């Protein structure tokens, strides 16, 4: 058994695709039109056969409530591992990304939390 897909609800698939590829540096892997929405995935640029992040349309009303509650509480929807949180933090700040948590050591990791512009807090972490 393997994890191959991970879903992330986004309020706008096109905006999410732009943010996750142009800002965070992921690569689009799959885009299949499915009526009003699409099956849309991105992968890490250096692991294109790895886990795919599905940018799921936020079309189910209870999911909107859940997403907003997590965002308002500052709870990340998911976490991405990076080699250097400080470096990514500075790079993304220069690109205009908003952070709710600046790089902070927490036990065996250093984290930062950013706003993905699509309704989610996303945690970056590096192993110390």
Image (spheres, grey):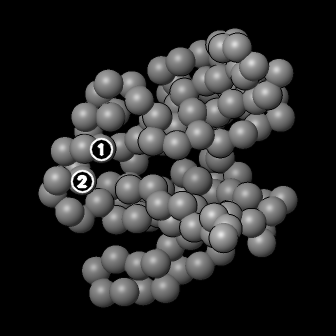
What kind of element bears circle 2? helix
The answer to whether 24 appears left or right of 14 in the picture is right
The answer to whether 102 appears left or right of 116 in the picture is right
Crowding at dot 1, Cα within 10 Å, few <14 / some 14-19 / many 20+, comes out as many
Residue 69 spot, x, y in % from top left = 25, 34
Residue 5 spot, x, y in % from top left = 57, 67
**Residue picked out by circle 2:** 63
Q: In this picture, is 95 found above or below 48? A: above
Residue 30 spot, x, y in % from top left = 59, 79
The answer to whether 71 appears left or right of 76 in the picture is left
Q: Nearer the viewer, residue 52 or 98?
A: 52
Q: Quadrant of the C terminus?
A: top right
Residue 119 spot, x, y in % from top left = 36, 43
Q: Nearer the viewer, residue 34 or 106?
A: 106
**Residue at point 61% right, 24% down?**
112
Q: Nearer the viewer, residue 104 or 26?
A: 104
Q: CA distance from mark 1 to mark 2?
A: 6 Å
Label disc, if present, on residue 67 of the rendered structure:
1
Q: Residue furthest left?
A: 61
Q: Please state the total of marks drawn on the protein image.
A: 2
The answer to whether 71 appears left or right of 128 in the picture is left
């Amino acid at each position: 058994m393997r994890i191959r897909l991970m879903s992330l609800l986004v309020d706008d698939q096109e905006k999410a695709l732009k943010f996750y590829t142009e800002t965070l540096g992921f690569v689009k892997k799959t885009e299949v039109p499915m009526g009003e929405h699409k099956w849309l995935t991105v992968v890490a640029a250096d692991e294109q056969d790895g886990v795919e992040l599905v940018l799921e349309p936020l079309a189910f009303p209870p999911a909107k409530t859940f997403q907003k509650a997590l965002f308002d509480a500052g709870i990340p929807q998911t976490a991405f591992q990076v080699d250097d949180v400080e470096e990514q933090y500075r790079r993304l700040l220069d690109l205009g990304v908003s952070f709710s948590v600046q790089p902070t050591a927490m036990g065996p990791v250093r984290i930062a939390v950013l706003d993905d512009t699509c309704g989610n807090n996303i945690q970056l972490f590096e192993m110390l």
